[in-house]
Image (cartoon, grey):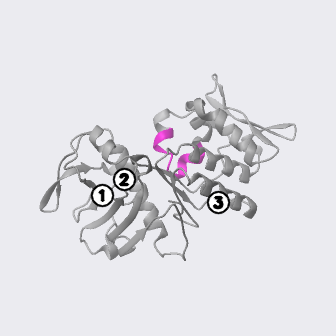
Amino acid sequence: MSQLRTRIRRIDFSNFKALGSYSLSLGEVNILVGPNNSGKSTIIGALRTLDAALRFARTRPPTRVHIGVTTAIGYRIPKESVPISLENVQTNYNGAEARVTFYLSNRNILVLVFPDDGGCVLTTQVDSGVVTSAANFKREFPISLVVVPVLGPVEHNELRRERSTVVDGLSTHRASRHFRSYWHYNPEGFEDFAALIARTWPGMAIKAPELDHSTGELTMFCLEERMTREIYWVGFGFQIWCQLLTHLSRAAENALVVVDEPEVYLHPDVQRQLLAHLIHEAEGEELTVGDEAVGLA
């Protein structure tokens, strides 16, 4: 299989939160549904943690890390970068080591380990031997994740955020607060994004953010049937749609896209349109969506 199509094929959970022992196989498109407390958020949390670990590992060589009484070559992920609580990782607080293992289609393996003494460690298994550098890691694990969090309405008055703040908040509940700032820092992709909005939401057009240098405030105007309004004053459904497509525009060819609760604020017709769009995109990338957690891979 070409590296360009490398994807996650299976995830095994061991003693991880609600999933004491569970295996999840992923196809091109996966929709995960279930009642409350069935483990959907647990799966999302594991994927969000993998996203943080991948970003960390791509920027530095691995080191020798301690896992309980053993040592391994890998990456100790800074606690402030781990997007889940590390206080209750083990199933039923049993104090034993927790693991989440990701099997890739190129036969390489990524393992998130949560030792009983705390913290989070990423280890690797590759056919070619041992990962020794950031470049080596990126070659052996040519995947990325785009985690779309539960989205809400945009800010009424959005001040321009620092670029690092915007990046750090992309997969968190803070993403809605940084919508205008994201496009302020990524103007090169805005033309394609605006064209996609026009195709998928008839009668609407969106303009690039404008910065008031005297106040630091950003505004984005939308044109609806010849009426111009700032995006805050447009319906919540359109705001959510714009944010969803913003996140999808970040997905590389071999990305796993995880969409959390995509139906929020969306009319059923728009929900069906989103699913059709995601299935179409899945022809070129891996996607995951769900009612509260995961879906398209």
Q: Residues within 10 Å of mark 1 (few under 14, many from 20)?
A: many
Magenta stretch: dominant SS? Answer: helix
Instruction: Name which residue type carries label 1.
Output: Ile
**Residue 81 appears in the picture as rendered:** no
Q: Nearer the viewer, residue 62 or 199?
A: 199
3D distance between C-alphas at marks 3 and 1: 29 Å
Residue 225 point in image, percent of width and height = 87, 41
The amino acid sitting under disc 2 is Val
Label 2: which secondary element:
loop
For image coordinates 53% across by 60% down, the residue present is: 296
Q: Is residue 90 above or below residue 225?
A: below
Q: Whole-percent x and y of residue 162?
A: 50, 33
Q: Pointer 3: what residue?
A: 275
Q: CA distance from mark 3 to mark 2?
A: 29 Å
**Does the rendering let one see residue 140?**
yes
Question: Which of the numbered marks, if any, corresponds to residue 124?
Answer: none
Is residue 250 located in the magenta-colored stretch of the structure? no
Q: Position of residue 114 (x, y in %)?
A: 27, 62
Q: Nearer the viewer, mark 3 or mark 2?
A: 3
Figure quadrant of residue 185: top right
Q: Residue at x 12, y 62 (%)?
A: 69
Q: Which residue is mark 2?
A: 82
Left or right of residue 235: residue 42: left
- Name which of mark 3 and mark 1 comes first in the sequence: 1
Marks 3 and 2, the one that precedes in the sequence: 2
In the image, which residues are magenta?
166-177
Which quadrant of the structure image shows residue 223? Answer: top right
Q: Helix, strand, or loop for circle 1?
A: strand
Instruction: Where is residue 269? Give x, y as percent.
Output: 75, 61
Residue at image position (34%, 48%) is 141
Name the residue carrying label 1.
109
Q: Earlier in the sequence, mark 1 or mark 2?
A: 2
